[in-house]
Image (cartoon, grey):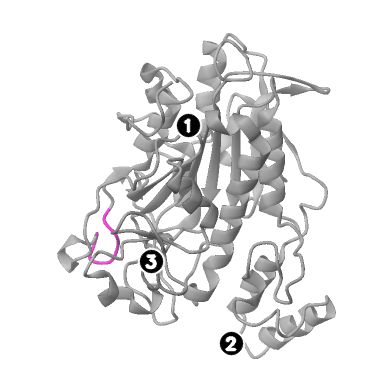
């Protein structure tokens, strides 16, 4: 089973050829202290209300009592983010970074579009424009920074089986898939099994097929295949998932003195229409492990790094009839890294009373994702502010300030 564009892949933008790597764009000096940027696309629409739960909002339980985890300090409870918000317990690494002032969740964010179609919204998210384009905002940012550094010879290396729209454009991008990345991890098998559990034909057929591949009945119970990081249901070491593999490789490449400076990864599994309570922990744990792998691979370069995790839209405030949530609007974005001004929750909370919901169903967006991206590009990668209109054509985007530590 090959990993598609909609699952886990990695793109790295750099000038990389015949065993020689040279910095294409991240500042004119080309030295080891250049800033690093990693963009993670969370494909499938992350439920921001479960990832960063506003347990202090009195209206939350009335909409989704069955999805709300216990408050911080209770068994299986949320990880506290200051008394109003709680982080999902699968995000242990991110919570540790928050405590170190290196993680900043931004709530009630959304793209500039209002489509609830995955593919259409993802294209708008990656192109960054008011119309669907054939190039991505990260590629356009790379092109501007290449010219700023007077290094027009650079091109990109994409680790994965395809190049996402985010990295397509005039800056050249190749691709490479590491050995073993074509095989799905146990969590993906678990998600497929959960989706077919009630089907009288495909449900038993899938269980029998997984048994033939060596999965036990215990491993195939709900949540068993998405258990503790690095350990299967029997307590045995689990094979490293593809996203963690790619994150490790990205961190190591970004850490090299004259290697790439910008990376883009993607991870699927966020489309939780049914059984969300038991399913969401798996992809969240993968994301958490991947960011931990990036930090480890980057070493001391982590202090000059920003990791930005984005999703195409959020999910409905109300729980649906199958224990899940449907396509929504407002959600959460994550910033992590040694260069992040974290230790707080960003954004403006809109409230959850019925009159405060967007179209009486979704978390109302209060922050444009493009302003978050522009703020990171300008204040971290030193993109000239006059070039923001080139990166995000069609409308004025004001960069959000205060997201990164001043240098």
> In the rendering, which numbered label is found on residue 339?
1
Q: Which residue is mark 2?
A: 198
**The furthest residue to the front:** 73
Q: Main secondary structure of the magenta part?
A: loop
Instruction: Report helix, strand or loop for mark 2.
Output: loop
Q: Quadrant of residue 211?
A: bottom right
Labels in figure, total: 3
User: What segment is highlighted magenta in the picture?
Assistant: 358-364
At horizontal 32% and vertical 54% (from top left) the residue drawn is 82
Say if 180 sits above or below 137 in the image: below
| Number of the front mark, 3 or 2 | 3
Instruction: Report helix, strand or loop for mark 1.
Output: loop
> In the rendering, which numbered label is found on residue 72?
3
**Is residue 159 at all visible to an observer of this figure?**
no
- Seen in the image, is 307 located left or right of residue 107? right
Q: Earlier in the sequence, mark 3 or mark 2?
A: 3
Expressed as whole percent of the image width and height from the top left, the position of residue 374 reads 39, 30
- Seen in the image, is 60 located left or right of residue 154? left
At horizontal 22% and vertical 70% (from top left) the residue drawn is 59
């Amino acid at each position: 089973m090959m990993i598609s564009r909609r699952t886990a892949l990695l793109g790295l933008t750099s000038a990389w050829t015949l065993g020689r790597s040279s910095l294409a764009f991240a500042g004119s000096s080309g030295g080891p202290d250049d800033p690093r940027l990693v963009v993670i696309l969370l494909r499938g629409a992350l439920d921001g209300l479960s990832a960063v739960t506003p347990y202090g909002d009195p209206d939350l339980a009335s909409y989704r009592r069955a999805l709300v985890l216990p408050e911080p300090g209770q068994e299986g409870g949320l990880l506290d983010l200051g008394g109003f918000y709680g982080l999902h317990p699968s995000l242990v690494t991110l919570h540790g970074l928050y405590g170190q002032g290196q993680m900043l969740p931004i709530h009630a964010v959304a793209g500039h579009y209002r489509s609830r179609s995955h593919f259409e919204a993802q294209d708008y998210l990656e192109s960054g424009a008011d119309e669907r384009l054939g190039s991505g905002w990260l590629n356009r940012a790379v092109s501007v920074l290449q010219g700023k550094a007077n290094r027009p010879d650079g091109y990109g290396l994409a680790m994965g089986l395809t190049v996402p729209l985010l990295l397509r454009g005039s800056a050249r991008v190749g691709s490479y898939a590491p050995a073993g990345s074509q095989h799905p991890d146990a969590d993906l098998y678990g998600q497929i099994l959960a989706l077919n559990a009630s089907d009288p034909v495909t449900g038993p057929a899938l269980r029998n097929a997984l048994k033939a591949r060596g999965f036990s009945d215990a491993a195939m119970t709900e949540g068993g295949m998405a258990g503790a990081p690095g350990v299967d249901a029997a307590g045995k070491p689990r094979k490293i998932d593809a996203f963690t593999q790619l994150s490790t490789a990205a961190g190591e490449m970004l850490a090299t003195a004259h290697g790439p400076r910008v990376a883009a990864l993607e991870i699927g599994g966020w489309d939780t229409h049914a059984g969300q309570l038991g399913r969401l922990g798996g992809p969240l744990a993968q994301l958490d492990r991947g960011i931990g792998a990036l930090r480890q691979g980057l070493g001391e370069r982590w202090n000059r790094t920003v990791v930005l995790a984005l999703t195409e839209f959020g999910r409905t405030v109300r729980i649906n009839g199958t224990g899940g949530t449907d396509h929504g609007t407002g959600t959460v974005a994550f910033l992590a890294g040694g260069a992040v001004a974290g230790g707080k929750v960003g954004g403006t909370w809109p409230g959850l009373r019925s009159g405060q919901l967007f179209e009486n169903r979704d978390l109302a967006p209060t922050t444009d994702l493009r302003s978050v991206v522009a703020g990171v590009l300008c204040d971290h990668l030193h993109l000239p502010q006059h070039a923001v209109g080139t990166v995000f054509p069609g409308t004025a985007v004001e960069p959000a300030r205060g997201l990164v530590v001043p240098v």
